[in-house]
Image: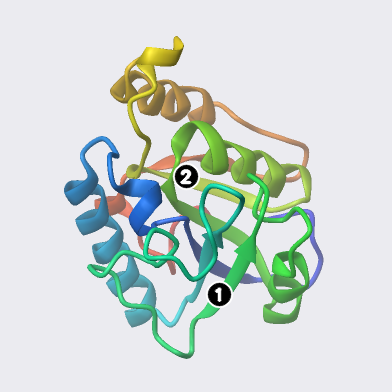
Amino acid sequence: MPTLTNRPHSALLIIDVQVGVVAEAYQRDAVIETIKTLLDKARQAKIHVIWIQHSDDQLIRESNEWQLVPELQRFATESLVEKHFGDAFEDTELEAMLASLGVGRLFIAGAQTDACIRSTIHGALVRGYDTFLIKDAHTTEDLTAWGAPPPELVIAHTNVYWSFQSAPGRKAGTIAAADVDFMDNCE
């Protein structure tokens, strides 16, 4: 149970699955297909789906690169949060939105593993949310030219260290998309 009071509901956060963000992402198509499966599960379970969409000086709002990928369709009833920083909570209405929906448990998928995903999972946990990373539904691009490990190792490392996260009164961890049951997981 999260440390937040009166927050019995769950939400699926789909972070930055935008044309320009995932254009060169590791296993792009497989990750998007996995997110699509999660999205279907969340909709069937009537779980809140919240789309997070980034913009900055390199990812210009309303540009083609800024658009959500065409493989995933956002329903008009699903919330959209625009952000300008890695952590989806930072200087956005996300926290107020989650409070109004009574959400205390988050399932997180999207891009980029080593940037906005990591920032948001840490931001959620420190704000009191039970925070679960869908271990096969996040990706990043290859930044080895700048000294980063290969993307498959970035993803694996994030999954390993997040599977051991904890905080007083909160739960965190990873779960495979196939094992997600929004109604039963992580109670």
Say which residue label 2 marks: 133
- Left or right: where 123 falls relative to 81: right
| Residue located at (69% from left, 53% from top) | 129
Q: Position of residue 181 (x, y in %)?
A: 36, 62
The answer to whether residue 128 is above or below residue 174 is: below
The answer to whether residue 45 is above or below residue 178 is: below
Q: Give the secondary structure at mark 2.
A: strand
Q: CA distance from mark 2 to mark 1?
A: 19 Å
Question: Disc 2 residue type?
Answer: Leu
Q: Quadrant of residue 149?
A: top left
Q: How many marks?
A: 2
Question: Disc 1 residue type?
Answer: Leu
- Left or right: where 74 falls relative to 119: left
| Residue located at (29% from left, 39% from top) | 25
**N-terminal label among 2 and 1:** 1
| Residue located at (26% from left, 65% from top) | 36
Q: Give the secondary structure at mark 1.
A: strand
Q: Position of residue 155 (x, y in %)?
A: 38, 28
| Camera-side mark, 2 or 1 | 1
Query: Residue 108 has which mark?
Result: none
The answer to whether residue 180 is above or below residue 48 is: above
The figure's colour scheme reads: rainbow
| Residue located at (56% from left, 43% from top) | 116
Quarter of the figure that contains the C terminus? bottom right
At label 2, counting other C-alpha atoms closer than 10 Å, the crowd grade (few under 14, some 14-19, many 20 or more) is: many
Residue 25 or 126: which is nearer the viewer? 25
Residue 114 or 21: which is nearer the viewer? 21
Say which residue label 1 marks: 80
Q: Position of residue 49 (x, y in %)?
A: 48, 73
Quarter of the figure that contains the N terminus? bottom right
